[in-house]
Amino acid sequence: MNNLNRRNFLGGMIAAGTAPILFNGCACGFCANRKINVAIIGCGRISNSFEILGVLKRRDIARLVAVCDLDSKRAAYSKRKIEKAYGDGTVIRTYHDYKELCACPDVDAVMICLPDFWHALVAATAICSGKAVWLQKPFTQTIQEGRILANLAKKFGTVLQVGSQQRSWSQFEAVCRAVREGVIGEVKRVEVGIGLDKSGGSSAAQPVPSNFDYETWLGPTDPTVPYNETRCHAQDTAKIESRPGWIQLAPYGWGMITNWGAHHIDIMQWGLGKDFEGPESVEGTCEWMDLSGGKLWNVHTTYDLHYAYNGGKTDGHVCDKYQNGVKFVGEKGDWLFCTRGAAKVTASDPDVPMKPGQLPPMAASRNILLPKLRKMADSATNSHVSNWLEAVAANDPKLTVTKAEVGHRSTSACSLGQMCMELGRGKKSARLNWDWRTESTGCPEADRMMKPFARDKYDLCVNLKEFGLDFDAVLKG
């Protein structure tokens, strides 16, 4: 069956509500007599330093079979890296078009490691194609994109893991469990530090490299902006694990509020037991990057945001003045703290050295709390990638540590912070109310910010229509 006919076939079954979960053509679950075939979509910093290595460590149940990237140089780099790691003559296929890869019947699962503004388009196609999905954080770029993906994952029973790997690190799991169990009593305040971005980049036009499909990379955003390496990613593959420019350049990324925020605000919601809910409001302000001298990067720098939970009884304070990490403060002053410490996921992650007076990866206000924390830490999930692969092998979405709905709710909280800061430009502060049940703010300007980015064929409506699905119907669930 060719790719187009296969898509039409799946689309017809989806519209009829009869589509099976397909793993290499095996309906009703994963074929247990062979390994999971995994493909990488996006061959940049995070996939080469995290996802690829995570799959290679589980050769007992999974095998990498393909990579996909709009930059042929990066795709070739990842291909060589994987083939060398296997060392057994394995040939990794390379793709330019993610839709072509998702139509491959021998690919069971995809790991989406793309710029944030591409997450929803690619993940929607992967889910509708019957693939298990690993989706890097933040879940999506806008709140409605997130609702679409969460609803699709539920509709198809997709085994989906969000790349919020702190949920698989023992100190975060232990602290959050202790908070939920009432070790510090009612939580009055959560102090969250997520680091700072710095101004930079260049707005000067450069020739587009012949190996890079820049026109497609721009996708649903403005197609007229000039190419500059600092808008996208480093062309020198020796720097493939360096921090890309888009991560601090709207509309491709929103800066630290959704970058590290997708980690630490996620931990705040986990500890508060708000995994499937969200804040009731967010209020605050920020400062924006200096664009003088032809600088390009334009997201926020400093930030000071207050998230209200539990009818306003709990204040989630996200502020650049705090140490990088999450501190839960109880009603009587006891507190529990967790952070990564000096640990990094990629070599280009910002250095977080411990300064005098700063706290270690796990700490408490009183030593008597720590033994329980250490005991609970032993039960933490060992590996985020491994957890996902085991869930794929079992064909059980409930086994993933960070499910689609959870990823959507945590990223929505980050997005609300970004929207609040944007609405507060030129003002002392701004405030947004949030009804997490209806996912609305009551502010027309803010609600418009929740809509997906769309341009021509780069449109969630188009992707869903290829599978016989209507955007508005999926959004409503």
Image (spheres, grey):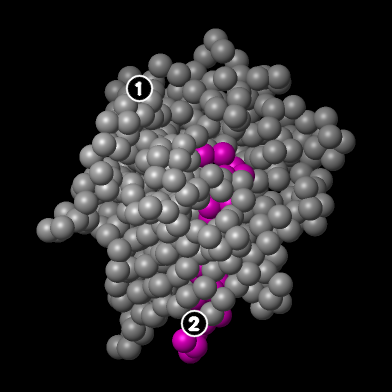
Task: Please tell me whether residue 450 is drawn above or below residue 430 in the rendered image.
Answer: above
Instruction: Name which residue type carries label 2.
Output: Ser
Image x and y of residue 259, in percent: 42, 58
Q: Secondary structure at mark 1?
A: loop
- Residue 208 colored in magenta in the image: no
For image coordinates 45% across by 52% down, the residue present is 187
Image x and y of residue 252, in percent: 49, 66
Relative horizontal placement of residue 474, taking residue 51 as reference (left or right): right
Q: Pick whichever, 10 or 336, lies toward us.
A: 336
For image coordinates 67% across by 53% down, the residue present is 147
Instruction: Name which residue type carries label 1.
Output: Gly
Q: Marks 2/1: CA distance?
A: 59 Å
Of tags 2 and 1, which is closer to the observer? 2
Q: Which residue is mark 1?
A: 89
For image coordinates 61% across by 46% down, the residue present is 276
Dividing the picture into quadrants, the one containing residue 244 is bottom left
Q: Which residue is mark 2?
A: 429
Relative horizontal placement of residue 453, taking residue 337 as reference (left or right): right
For image coordinates 70% across by 19% down, the residue present is 28
Res. 150 in view: yes
Q: Which residues are magenta?
A: 402-428
Answer few, some or many: residues within 10 Å of disc 1's Cα (few below 14, many 20 plus, some between 14 and 19).
few
Dividing the picture into quadrants, the one containing residue 377 is top left
Image x and y of residue 387, in percent: 46, 28
Q: Pick whichever, 3 or 221, lies toward us.
A: 221
Choose the circle earlier in sequence order: 2 or 1: 1
